[in-house]
Amino acid sequence: MTGQAPVTPRPGTTRPAPLPVRLRSAVEDALGRPAAQQPPWRDATAVRRVRAVLERVEEVVRVEEVDRLRARLAAVADGAAFLLQGGDCAETFAAATERHIAGTVGTLSHMAATLTSGGGLPVVTVGRIAGQYAKPRSAARDAQGLPSYRGDIVNAPDASPEARVPDPDRMLRAYVNSSATMAVVRALTATAPHGPGGPHLPDGGFYTSHEALLLDYERALLRAVGDAGDGPALYDLSAHFLWIGERTRQPDGAHIALAGLLANPIGLKLGPTATPEQAIEYVERLDPHHEPGRLTLISRMGSARVREVLPPIVEKVSASGHPVIWQCDPMHGNTERCGGFKTRHFDRIADEVRGFFAVHRALGTHPGGLHLELTGGDVTECLGGAQRLSGADLCHRYETACDPRLNGAQARELAGLVAELVRGAA
């Protein structure tokens, strides 16, 4: 496997059946709502052509894997397990190599082993991998005046007007790389050694996730499966777990509406502007049946705000009776600039995690998970940690396509800190 994957997807062994009329109508209604952060495609016919191809291909993940994850996340919601989620801020086609994939899987597996042994709870491990190719942006143009880079699934990072033109054919390449990455992940998790000398893969398994941002891609990988009392269920088989980001969580928007139709476990990012009233509206829409583990609320408040903003949200949601998972993303609220680089400081990341645990300890709720941007590589993108990386170090190996990631050593260090917090909260 290399970063230069072919762009012709392999058809499935059997052609997926069209969505039943009921589900097709519901999907069209959801996608007819306002949709933030979508690329300004120039050729609508090309987009439809690409979607038609993806509607016929083999799915990236399997239904039984999604169902298995739902069951394991129910244990997290019940306080009997911990959810570890992490990987690249934005995957790139060039980095879709066995070595890079193994580095991410190995780092998460090492962290899971630390959390299991030190924290005393089983760990469910979910990678930001095999599909994390789309990125929301705060502005339509970057500092150079070029259209913003929106992830390899949309355009290229090269600083030229031609590279930044949204190209729907890149969705095909994202699918091919996601499928190939999934095959490598399955091979690694099936054959990796256990115990000293190799990564320990917990019984909770290893699953994939990405932000369900690019709606043209997600809709093409929807599949109707089973025949329950009210008809088949709707799965997005681009990943096991999908989340809605801070910039696309408009209550009446297309992202929330589509997520509400899916049988996949769903995550929702909540930043410092989120209110308890909004949180209740989200959980009622996304978890109407009070299903344990169906919905993960991912707080990304920043170390300075988490102790203030999070408690009333937790109290309100807990009082509603919805058995959600509470997960901490300590990365996005702690971004800063240093010498022209976007970075994050390990101390503030750790402080937000401590604040998250303190809030739940005070309220008697379960601090159920951690959501990180990380890599197994020895990059220099985040400051601090035991390596004491400084601003002068950032230029040495700053390799991210978008936001700064913890390197392998920093990620493992944070896992040790979190294991102590998990043990203390048990």
Image: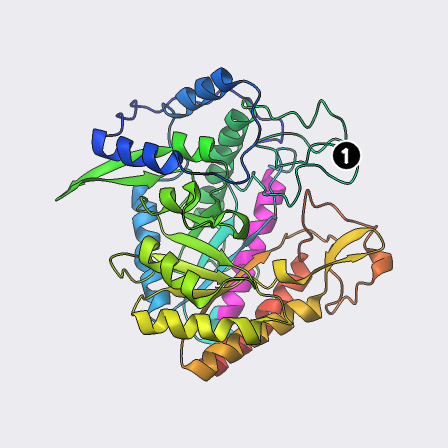
Give residue 299's position: percent from left, percent from top. 51, 63
Part of the protein shown in magenta: 97-115
Residue drawn at x 62%, y 58% is 332
**In the rendered image, which residue does mark 1 sit on?**
145
Assess whether residue 138 is covered by the magenta stretch. Answer: no
Residue drawn at x 49%, y 83% is 424
Viewer can see residue 141: yes
Asked where in the image residue 77 lies, by quadrant, the reply is bottom left
Asked where in the image residue 235 lies, by quadrant, the reply is top left
Judge the density around disc 1: few (<14), some (14-19), many (≥20) Cα neighbours within 10 Å: few
Q: With respect to residue 166, does 64 lie above or below?
A: below
Q: With respect to residue 158, does 258 lie above or below?
A: below
Viewer can see residue 199: no
Q: Mostly what secondary structure, the magenta segment?
A: helix
Give residue 90's position: percent from left, percent from top. 61, 43
Viewport quadrant of the N terminus: top right
| Relative side of 72 to 355, left or right | left
Viewport quadrant of the C terminus: bottom left
| Relative side of 324 to 379, left or right | left
